[in-house]
Image (cartoon, rainbow, N blue to C red):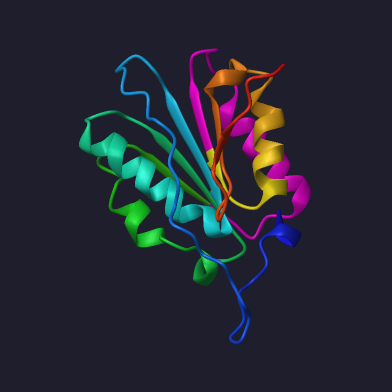
């Protein structure tokens, strides 16, 4: 979501906390789809590395305003032998919503959805995921905040 991925400009104050990460489902039959936008890339690249080191397949959808603002792009690309990595760059809000909805459909209720980024980004991914997966399988990571999981329908 273009308006919610604000660029960091020199002299801006930015809080960057230790990336939080939810427990990872390591069941080989469980599909994991990871979404990140802006500062959420740090948490998601960590989850992708954990899945890769455990030998689990995953799918990463990395959203950024442009190639030069795509944080951790090289780290994600280095994981292509272990999972699918997609970079979605310079999308309008409408195209972002369409692309993120398309990437998770169709899927199964047991699919694990991990998303990290600005609140508007994670809220949209969560709303879309609720159409496909059980609420307890949606893991939202807000940079600078603690890990949250929505368990209410």
- Residue 5 counted in the magenta span: no
Question: Measuring 21% from the left and 38% from the top, which residue is drawn there?
Answer: 53
- Estimate the x, y position of residue 3 in percent, counting from the top left: 75, 61
User: On screen, 52 above or below 118?
Assistant: above
Q: Is residue 106 left or right of residue 120?
A: left
Q: Is residue 152 left or right of residue 8?
A: right
Question: Measuring 37% from the left and 23% from the top, which residue is drawn there?
Answer: 25
- Residue 104 counted in the magenta span: yes
Q: Is residue 114 visible?
A: yes
- Estimate the x, y position of residue 129 in percent, counting from the top left: 63, 26
Which of the 4 image quarters holds residue 5?
A: bottom right
- Estimate the x, y position of residue 139 in percent, counting from the top left: 54, 32
Quick one: 11 or 51, which is closer to the camera? 11
The quadrant the C terminus occupies is: top right
Q: What's the magenta region?
A: 88-114
- Estimate the x, y position of residue 10 in percent, counting from the top left: 58, 86
């Amino acid at each position: 979501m273009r308006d919610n991925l604000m660029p960091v400009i020199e002299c801006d104050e930015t809080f960057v906390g230790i990336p939080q990460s939810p427990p990872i489902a390591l069941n080989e039959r469980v599909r994991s789809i990871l979404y990140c936008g802006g500062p959420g890339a740090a948490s998601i690249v960590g989850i992708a590395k954990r899945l890769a080191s455990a030998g689990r397949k995953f799918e990463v959808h990395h959203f950024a305003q442009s190639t030069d603002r795509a944080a951790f792009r090289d780290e994600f690309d280095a994981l292509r032998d272990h999972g699918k990595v997609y970079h979605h760059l310079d999308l309008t809000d409408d195209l972002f919503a369409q692309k993120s909805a398309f990437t998770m459909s169709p899927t199964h209720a047991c699919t694990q959805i991990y998303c990290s980024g600005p609140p508007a980004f994670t809220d949209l991914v969560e709303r879309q995921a609720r159409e496909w997966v059980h609420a307890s399988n949606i893991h939202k990571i807000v940079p600078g905040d603690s890990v949250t999981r929505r368990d209410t329908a």
